[in-house]
Amino acid sequence: MNTVPIGLLLSLLLVLILLSGFFSGSETALMRLNRYRLRHQAKQGHRGAIRTARLLENPERLISLILLGNNFVNILASAIATVIALRLIGEPGIAVATAVLTLVILVFAEVTPKTLATRRTEQVAYFAAAVYQPLMTVVYPLVLSTNWVSECILRLLKVECEQAEVEALSSDELRTVLNETTGMIPPRHREMLVNILDLSSVSVNDIMVPRSDITGLDLDNSWEEVKQSISESPHSRILVYRENIDQVQGFIHLRMMLDSLSTGEYTLETLKKNIREPYFIPEGTTLTVQLLNFQREKRRIGLVVDEYGDIQGLVTIEDIVEEIVGEFDTDPYHGPEEVQAQDDGSFIADGSAQIRALNKALNWDLSADGPKTLNGIVLEHFENFPTQGAVFTFNGHSMTVLEVEENFVQRVRIDPASTEHDAAEPD
């Protein structure tokens, strides 16, 4: 080394520092790379993505290759810097070389290249993969030996050497990813995707039309009354029963009756022949499961029943679709919007408004484990049927009962949240 020109040693030291920066930056870029985007680009035939994906199939070997290269150039750079310092300054130069080289490597071989890698992740990773692929072939025996020794040490320490599990996302993690893709996916599409993930946490009880709001045809009525009910019905499928909904007979598709009308066979007997048997849904069934059940059973409408077989409500496939894409405002079962904003910042809500409707309209976070409707919230608070004008505080909002009819709270006024949050506890 004493015969090698100082200029050549300085040039070699500069090259080694650049190589150290390359190894450090490429490690950051390859480990930070978005695996899902990488797989997508690889499927599209992107050469850099394909090459990088192959290297990342065994990250342990890739890390070993990078660390071997990085440590080799750093140690060699340290040795050359020491030689240069000894020749220029003498023995005190060892301390100077250590201090200067530490600072140079920290700035130019660590911080700067890693910062660049975080800002140009794909470009750095794909370029590095083009270098590492042939280099891996050359030093593969050394990499394999290094990994074997490392695994032996881990076994001595009684650390299990299991293969890394395939990277997967839970539904909550996927929801977080979707919410953070601002600008990449249109907000409306992102909202729909998140709603799909939420279907598994919502049951049919949360969206069903309550029993009290279900209308249908009573076969015990006269034929003239039945015909009038059919002609005035806003629904394409009508529930058919005898005397009351508990004696349900099934559903009739109005299109069938139109066919009968065209053939001149528009009679009560024809209507009975076209009744399709009812389809029942156990309460608590999640919307994800029920959507698949509707598809499998080739149904569009069903009756929700409790553990005793009593009918609790009605759910259609359109109700589930609306949970994904939003309200169509064309569903005659639900009528006008259940929660209506007023000019003064308050809301007028129907007593039949579902908890999910309140959560969406008022930005609440009420659990579905308690009452399912606003009427249930009011009754739970008063522990009795309130009188018109009764006022109470719930979830920080002053609520006024506007209308009570037939033991059911029809309408409630919800004022803006007060400064003091008050829970819904009986006075």
Image: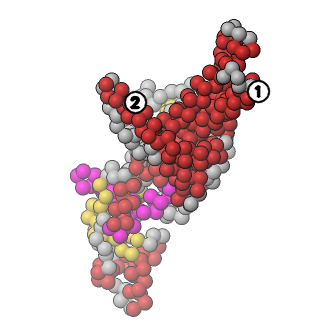
Using a 10 Å C-alpha cutoff, classify the residue at mark 2 as few (fewer than 14 neighbours), some (14 to 19) or many (20 or more): few
155 relative position to 308: left or right: right
80 relative position to 359: left or right: right
The residue positioned 69% from the left and 20% from the top of the image is 2
- What amino acid is at disc 1? Gly
The residue positioned 64% from the left and 43% from the top of the image is 124
**Is 324 a magenta residue?**
yes
- What amino acid is at disc 2? Ser
Q: How did the renderer colour the structure? A: secondary structure
For disc 2, the marked residue is 150
Q: Quadrant of the N terminus?
A: top right
Look at discs 2 and 1 and give the one toward the viewer: 1
What range is drawn magenta here? Answer: 297-326
**Is 415 a magenta residue?**
no
Compare residues 314 and 194 and report the one nearer the observer: 194
The residue positioned 67% from the left and 45% from the top of the image is 343
Looking at the image, the residue that sits furthest to the front is 3
The residue positioned 31% from the left and 25% from the top of the image is 156
**216 w.r.t. 53: above or below:** below
360 relative position to 236: left or right: right
For disc 1, the marked residue is 7
Image x and y of residue 254, in percent:
41, 77
Q: Is residue 201 in view from this perspective? A: yes
